[in-house]
């Protein structure tokens, strides 16, 4: 395995970790080829990044994305590479996509899993632990990944998602419902124990 340009790869091709139904790693696949009408279950993550004022950094996916192009969503999503720590993968991805550093990174929804199908039949099929973090930085987005960014107060964002007045990606909609169940204040969301993560993510949490 080699690391190049901040991504985890074999022979220069970025990989994702394939999972069985219990969340154990069973192999790898090239990220660029894994999403199709029969997308295999694989490991991912989502992260919600806040500023000191309690605003959430929301992002619009680039128009060239294979899944949900142009959709507004949570701050960042991605895939840990083989042998890459989950928290390290979150930090890598926010640095690549948004040019920001994170403080107080913690996993708050360790068991989140979803399957979603686009109108063209392309499937997302992920075990996707959800992280929360804070930043003092302003985003400098990579246009190949992010079309636009906005800071939105969390109460406003969550209320609009829950009422359906704000259109977001299907995973973001599900995650906001679950996050609201943790309470209204993101600072009070407690870190989950590593034992609640999929085994593949337990192996690479740090």
Image (tube, helix red, strand yellow):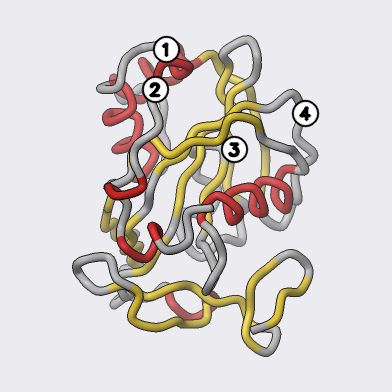
Distance from label 1 to label 3 (Cα)?
21 Å
Q: Are marks 3 and 4 in contact (CB under 8 Å)?
A: no
At 80% from the left edge and 39% from the top edge, which residue is drawn? 140
Crowd around label 2: few <14 · some 14–19 · many ≥20 (10 Å)? some
Distance from label 2 to label 3 (Cα)?
22 Å
Q: Looking at the rendering, which quadrant does residue 40 occupy?
A: bottom left
Q: Looking at the rendering, which quadrant does residue 124 occupy?
A: bottom left
* Residue at the farthest bottom position: 11
Q: Nearer the viewer, mark 2 or mark 3?
A: 2
Distance from label 3 to label 4 (Cα)?
13 Å
> x%, y% of residue 56?
56, 23
Residue 159 circle label? none
At 29% from the left edge and 71% from the top edge, which residue is drawn? 24
Distance from label 4 to label 2 (Cα)?
23 Å
User: According to the image, label 2 marks what residue?
Assistant: 189
Q: Are marks 2 and 1 in contact (CB under 8 Å)?
A: yes
Report whether 192 appears left or right of 150.
left
At 33% from the left edge and 81% from the top edge, which residue is drawn? 26
Q: Secondary structure at mark 2?
A: loop
Residue 185 circle label? 1
- In this rendering, is residue 52 above or below 97? above
Q: Are marks 1 and 3 in contact (CB under 8 Å)?
A: no
Q: Earlier in the sequence, mark 1 or mark 3?
A: 3
Q: Earlier in the sequence, mark 4 or mark 1?
A: 4
- In this rendering, is residue 51 above or below 60? above
User: According to the image, label 3 marks what residue?
Assistant: 59
Q: Nearer the viewer, mark 1 or mark 3?
A: 1
Residue 138 circle label? 4
């Amino acid at each position: 395995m080699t690391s190049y340009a901040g991504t985890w790869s074999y022979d220069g091709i970025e990989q994702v970790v394939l999972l069985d139904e219990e969340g154990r790693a069973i192999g790898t696949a090239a990220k660029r080829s894994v999403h199709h009408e029969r997308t295999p279950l694989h490991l991912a993550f989502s992260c919600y990044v806040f500023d000191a004022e309690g605003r959430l950094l929301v992002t619009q996916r680039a128009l060239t994305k294979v899944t949900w192009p142009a959709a507004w969503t949570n701050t960042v999503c991605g895939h840990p590479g083989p042998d890459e720590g989950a928290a390290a993968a979150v930090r890598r991805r926010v640095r690549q996509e948004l040019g920001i550093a994170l403080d107080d990174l913690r996993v708050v929804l360790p068991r989140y899993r979803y399957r979603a199908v686009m109108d063209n039949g392309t499937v997302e099929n992920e075990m996707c632990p959800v992280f929360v973090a804070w930043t003092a930085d302003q985003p400098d987005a990579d246009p190949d990944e992010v079309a636009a960014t906005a800071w939105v107060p969390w109460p406003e964002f969550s209320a609009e998602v829950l009422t359906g007045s704000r259109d977001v990606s299907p995973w973001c909609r599900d995650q906001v419902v679950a996050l609201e169940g943790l309470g209204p204040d993101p600072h009070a969301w407690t870190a989950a124990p590593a034992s609640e993560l999929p085994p593949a993510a337990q192996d690479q949490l740090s």
